[in-house]
Image: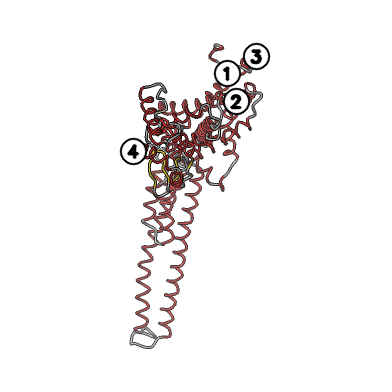
Amino acid sequence: MTPQAIPESARSATPQARRIALLISVVIFILAAINGIFTWSGAHLFIKEPVYALLFAVAVQFSIAISLIALPFVRGLGKLVLLVVYSAALVLSTLSAYTFIYNSGLPGSLANVKAVDTPLKAEVADRLSEIMLAEQEAIDAETERLAFLERQAEEEAQRGYRSGRGAGKGPEYYRKLEALQADQVRFEAVKRDYDQARDIYRQMNQALAQPADDQREQLILLLSMLKSHLNTDQGRALATELAQGKLAVIQSPVEKAMSRIVDRDHLSIQLVISVVWAAVFDLLALFLGIIRYYILRPSRSLLNGLYEMIAAFVTFIIRLGYIRKHARQRFNHELQQQSHGTPLNSAEMQSFATFVMAGSQFSAGEGQEATEPLKKLIAHIEPLKLADDPSAVGVPFEVLDTQKEMKTLMAMLIQNEVFLSDVEHQAYRLNPGSEMAQRIMVFIRMGLQDDQRPQDLAPLFHAAGG
């Protein structure tokens, strides 16, 4: 880098300091490249195209490195923009690297996202046990109920009234006996379903114990078969929840990693270690970037730079609110200034001066100088301080009522639109949109250049745009 290419603000650093800063810059890029490997790996889990994942990693890490290197040379609002870009890139880099590192620590999670991991196996086995327990409780309850019905029928046979068929085998006995036999038939079907459910339960346990590529699909099919042989509402509800809410939902590596951050009940050492590994190289680059900042800018505090940045940002926001007002004022000012470039010795200016002097001479009385009415008119031009137009200048009506010799000159100027008659505010207003009005202000300047009142009338010229 040549001395001419070095910014003026960087020349305060010694050559040795610049060499150290250059070495730190190289190390920052090396650290960004190292962390870029993790960034690419995490992005590739979500973006299956390796080229796009590589472009993403390069963009993120380059943003981090170049932001740290350019930080000493940027001030004000530019530093805020640079820090926003750096913060966004740091977040993307950390989350992408964390996704890869966290999933790498889980057994088999990167090899096959459809595999049933150990926590899910434990949950499936636990829910299957609850289903079979609910079915067993239903079988026991039905067995107990049938035994009660059988005892009722026997008691009816022993105590019942005679019907010609035995001691007590009357109509009530046969009614109870028929109900018992119907329930026993239904119970036999329930027991067959339960036996088949137990067989499917054993098959599911075997499928859980033997890992396979299609293990999840096998469990879903066996679970649907199991549900067709369940006879309790609780068992069917558990089977539906297990099939649709656990086995059927396949989380991508990104979802699996991010869910551990969101779910505070499952924070673990592995999560903390993964986050630390994901950010360690970027944070080390940040530390070196701060050192480089103070090597190149030993007299500028980073906190002062932060204060300037915030102040510049607030000023920018405030200026946005006044941009329309500022544009309107600037337009009016430029409109009023558009004829100020007319040379004083031009034929147009000389013609206008002749016109004004002729009007003044025509208005002068006997024994008065030709310029006396013009001088009086100039002396009475003042800011009108109107609410709707603070910059308006002119001559009040009451002045011309007392200075009648100026009326002829004012009439000529009104005819040429140098002044506008404002009846509402009882004043003759200098027309800011008229080139003649602007030229008369130049003419007033010429007439007062040797006078002692220019300083007193300076606010007037400023208000009129002169």
Pick whichever of labels 1 and 4 is earlier in the sequence: 1
Residue 243 or 311: which is nearer the viewer? 311
Residue 32: x %, y % from top left: 54, 25
At numbered mark 1, what does the secondary structure look like: helix, strand or loop?
Answer: helix
At numbered mark 4, what does the secondary structure look like: helix, strand or loop?
Answer: helix
Q: CA distance from mark 1 to mark 2?
A: 20 Å
Question: Which numbered marker is on residue 415?
Answer: 4
From this view, report whether residue 47 is shown above or below residue 16. below
Please give the residue where the numbered disc 2 appears in the rendered image: 289
Question: Which numbered marker is on residue 461?
Answer: none
The N terminus lies in quadrant: top right
Residue 37 seen: no
The kind of residue on which mark 1 rests is Glu
Please give the residue where the numbered disc 3 appears in the rendered image: 16
Pick whichever of labels 1 and 2 is earlier in the sequence: 1
Camera-nearest label, 2 or 4:
4
Residue drawn at x 48%, y 32% is 42
From this view, report whether residue 196 is shown above or below residue 36. below
Residue drawn at x 37%, y 81% is 173
Camera-nearest label, 2 or 3:
3
